[in-house]
Amino acid sequence: MRNLLSLHIEPHSGINFVVGANGSGKTSLLEAISMLSRGRSFRTPQIRKVISHEHRDLTVFGQLAVDGESPQHRIGIRRTSGGETLAKIDGERKDRLSDLALMLPTVDVESSSFELVDGGPSVRRELLDWGLFHVEHRFLEVWKRYRTALEQRNALLKAGDGPALKQSLLYWDSQLAEHGHALDSLRQDYFDKFAVTLSALAERYLGLMSITVQYLPGWNQLHYPSLLACLQQNRGAELEKARSLYGPHRADLEIRWEGQPARDICSRGQKKLVIYAVRLAQVVMYQQARGSTPILLLDDLPAELDKSNIERVSRFLCDYPCQSFITAIDKDIRDSGLLSMFGSHRMFHVEHGQLIHATSTHPERRETTPHV
């Protein structure tokens, strides 16, 4: 994929450094793990931008171990430039990529993660929904039912007004409201716990007491007694725009720094601290609910962080041991002092899309062995 050739790695169960020059294939290795987890790269949903130019497909394969035992599961995915997808777990074909996500959860911090602060609401909704997907078994079914109601209702709004359409809209209004309230309730419960976790983590590990978050459900719950009332009272505006303007699909997670929107007042370095606070809070929430931790993909950790903040992130990784893959230029790894912060780790040197060599310090059990 991208500039990676055929590659086989046997990573450490804890910290794995992937070093090399810019363009050597470091980030592509993290993308491969992301592909194995969610069926797509964290950089782009467009598979043609991920597959190497001279190839028509890519394949990623991994072996997973739990609690230090020998590999217990085999997972793999093949994607073609024509859009075909083949995913397997233990040799059995899976039609849902969510099965891979459950088997191999990942949390990433990379260049596009700034969209969490600067981008639109969909990125932040995805953050909430990732957490719910992994800790609340009802979430996926509720989310699917809401999306079905939303698609049907939008199709009717695009068709225009009329007696028959009006009757159909009444039905889909009730469906959207019913499943919308269920989805909103799940998100609100998760958010309440997430906000507490984020505040405590940001202060303890990153020295930040200025980050706050607010959940915006997608409609004014103080003004309208219910989502159904909101839909019915705003029917004219929605028919004019030909789409549903209110509901959980319009929800947002507002991130503030010292009471102001973080996107407006934070420097790039401060934004990266905010991103780490949010992502690491997800790790804690997952660990508390599942008793294990997701895999961390940290692309260019030393960038935009000074040595003290790098030490803060490293302290978290020591307190919450995750299998982590950290990329950086070799010089930045050594200058930041990262190597001395972890007594046990494995380092992979990548050059021109190939693994040049790997070194270990106190190697431990193997948990994941991706093949790219």
Image (cartoon, grey):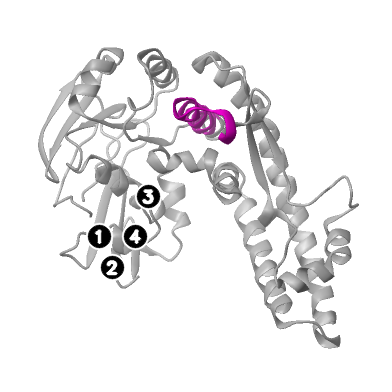
Amino acid beneath label 3: Arg
- Between marks 3 and 2, how big is the CA–CA gap? 17 Å
Q: Are marks 1 and 4 in contact (CB under 8 Å)?
A: no
- Could you tell which of marks 3 and 2 lies nearer the N-terminus? 3
Determine which quarter of the picture holds residue 301.
Answer: top left
Q: Mark 4 points at which residue?
A: 88
Q: How crowded is mark 3: few (under 14 residues within 10 Å), some or many (20 or more)?
A: some
Q: How many labels does the image show?
A: 4
- Could you tell which of marks 1 and 4 lies nearer the N-terminus? 1
Question: Where residue 80 is drawn, which disc sits there?
Answer: 2
Amino acid beneath label 1: Ile
Q: How crowded is mark 2: few (under 14 residues within 10 Å), some or many (20 or more)?
A: some
Nearer to us: label 2 or label 4: 2
Quick one: SS at disc 4?
A: strand
Nearer to us: label 1 or label 2: 1
Relative to 161, residue 49 above or below: above
- Between marks 1 and 4, how big is the CA–CA gap? 19 Å
Question: Where residue 43 is drawn, which disc sits there?
Answer: 3
- Between marks 3 and 1, how big is the CA–CA gap? 13 Å
- Could you tell which of marks 2 and 4 lies nearer the N-terminus? 2
Q: How crowded is mark 4: few (under 14 residues within 10 Å), some or many (20 or more)?
A: some
Q: Where is residue 126 in the image (x, y as percent from the top left)?
A: 56, 48
Give the residues in magenta.
Answer: 263-284
Does 372 sit left or right of 157 as displayed?
A: left
Nearer to us: label 4 or label 3: 3
- Quadrant of the snapshot with the N terminus: bottom left
Along the line of sight, the residue nearer the viewer: 55 or 371? 55
Q: Residue at x 27, y 37 (%)?
A: 70
Q: Residue at x 91, y 52 (%)?
A: 225
- Between marks 4 and 3, how big is the CA–CA gap? 23 Å
- Between marks 1 and 2, how big is the CA–CA gap? 8 Å
